[in-house]
């Protein structure tokens, strides 16, 4: 695993050996999870191969594909599709469905104006009314824009076994249903629900899944990578606010996804910096997601406080770390991606899911001991 994990203001744990043993048990339990097995056995590669005809059809025939999803699954899909770069001329992905606001629909229809649109509904359980409403509205929109013949092959459903309404609608309307793996409502970053949108947008899915595998199989979990999950559990159990922050627009949905885990997500906040800096002042544990080399740069004219080389990317990293490490009291972790590419995005997604799995195990251990 090439991700770097830097620590800030952590107190040395006198029970570290005991907690390392607990983390070992957590990892043993996690290795039995379906999503971990899918990565270790490379079953997720086979999933990508099976999805290739659908992804190619949608990407070749659509300018934009709307992915309908709700809840944490929507946050997962939005996080990975925004974090992983796609083809410059690839199909646009819009994640939608978690709203009943007419304003949101107005903005969506504005984005779809004049576009050849496709629709993929992703759901793993009982469908909320906002998702069913979005499906009815978007399906009618696409059929009215293209006609029944033109819409054929541009509408799909990716469903778990408990998704009844969407499956029934697909059968009635004669569009294809693709199975969705169980457990993706919590851990879905290497599931069909995430893989298909990445392939549609032209992302390097092999690099993404390879990065995911590299993080899952990394020996660092047996050394010290488990400490982040333990810190999350401690903060959650003590009801200390957790703040997940980034300065990068492409990772804003990632920190919002991270804030959706835990027993009580009300104590978790995602922050886009610097505009949400005030949120960080209340953190009991802060996580900063950084990118060493974000990619395309902008060279700036000379101004007060500018980077010596005139690089906007370097200035962002300087300001980000200066402000993060200026806090000499609050515990924190900086998770550093080397590049903003598919491989590092896959590593980050797997690191988040494993860490949250460890945290969930630690919280359960504490609950059992009460």
Image: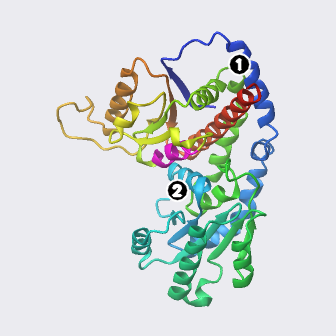
Q: Nearer the viewer, residue 322 or 187?
A: 187
Q: Nearer the viewer, residue 367 or 51?
A: 367
Q: Viewed as shown, does residue 179 lie left or right of 328? A: right
- Residue 305, image x, y percentages: 21, 30
Is label 1 in a helix, a strand or a loop?
Answer: helix
Location of residue 212 with respect to 168 vertically, above or below: above
Among numbered discs 2 and 1, the one appearing first in the sequence: 1
Res. 147 image quadrant:
bottom right
Identify the residue at horizontal 44%, vertical 72% (top origin): 105
Location of residue 8 with respect to 68 vertically, above or below: above
- Where does label 2 land, which residue? 86
- Where does label 1 land, which residue? 19
Q: Is residue 210 magenta?
A: no
Quadrant where the image shows the C terminus: top right
Stretch of the chain drawn in magenta: 251-260
How far apart, in angstroms, are the residues tagged by discs 2 and 1? Answer: 40 Å
Of badges 2 and 1, the one in the foreground is: 1
Identify the residue at horizontal 79%, vertical 47% (top origin): 34
Is label 2 in a helix, a strand or a loop?
Answer: loop
């Amino acid at each position: 695993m090439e991700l770097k994990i830097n620590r800030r203001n952590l107190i040395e744990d006198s029970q570290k050996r005991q907690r390392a043993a607990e983390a070992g048990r957590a990892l043993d339990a996690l290795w039995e999870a379906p999503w971990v097995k899918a990565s270790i056995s490379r079953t997720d590669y086979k999933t990508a191969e099976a999805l290739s005809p659908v992804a190619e059809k949608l990407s070749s025939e659509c300018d934009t594909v709307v992915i309908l999803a709700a809840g944490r699954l929507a946050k997962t899909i939005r996080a990975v599709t925004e974090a992983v770069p796609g083809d410059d001329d690839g199909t646009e992905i819009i994640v939608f469905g978690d709203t009943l606001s007419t304003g949101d629909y107005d903005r969506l229809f504005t984005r779809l104006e004049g576009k050849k649109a496709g629709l993929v509904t992703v759901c793993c359980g009982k469908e909320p009314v906002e998702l069913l409403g979005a499906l009815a509205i978007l399906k009618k929109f696409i059929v009215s824009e293209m006609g029944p013949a033109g819409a054929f092959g541009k509408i799909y459903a990716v469903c778990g076994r408990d998704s009844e309404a969407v499956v029934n609608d697909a059968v009635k309307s004669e569009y294809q249903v693709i199975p969705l793996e169980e457990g993706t409502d919590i851990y879905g970053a290497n599931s069909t629900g995430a893989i298909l949108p990445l392939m549609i947008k032209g992302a390097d899915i092999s690099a993404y899944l390879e990065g995911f595998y590299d993080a899952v199989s990394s020996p660092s979990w047996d050394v010290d990578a488990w400490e982040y999950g333990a810190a999350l559990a401690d903060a959650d159990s003590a009801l200390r606010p957790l703040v997940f922050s980034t300065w990068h627009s492409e990772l804003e949905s990632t920190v919002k996804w991270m804030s959706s885990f835990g027993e009580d997500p009300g104590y978790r906040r995602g922050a886009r910096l610097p505009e949400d800096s005030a949120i960080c002042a209340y953190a009991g544990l802060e996580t900063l997601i950084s990118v060493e080399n974000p990619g395309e740069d902008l060279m700036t004219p000379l101004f007060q406080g500018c980077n010596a080389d005139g690089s906007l990317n370097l200035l962002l990293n300087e300001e980000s770390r200066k402000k993060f490490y200026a806090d000499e009291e609050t515990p924190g972790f900086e998770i550093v991606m080397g590049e903003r590419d598919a491989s590092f995005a896959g590593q980050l997604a797997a690191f988040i899911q494993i860490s949250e799995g460890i945290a969930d195990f630690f919280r359960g251990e504490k609950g059992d001991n009460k």
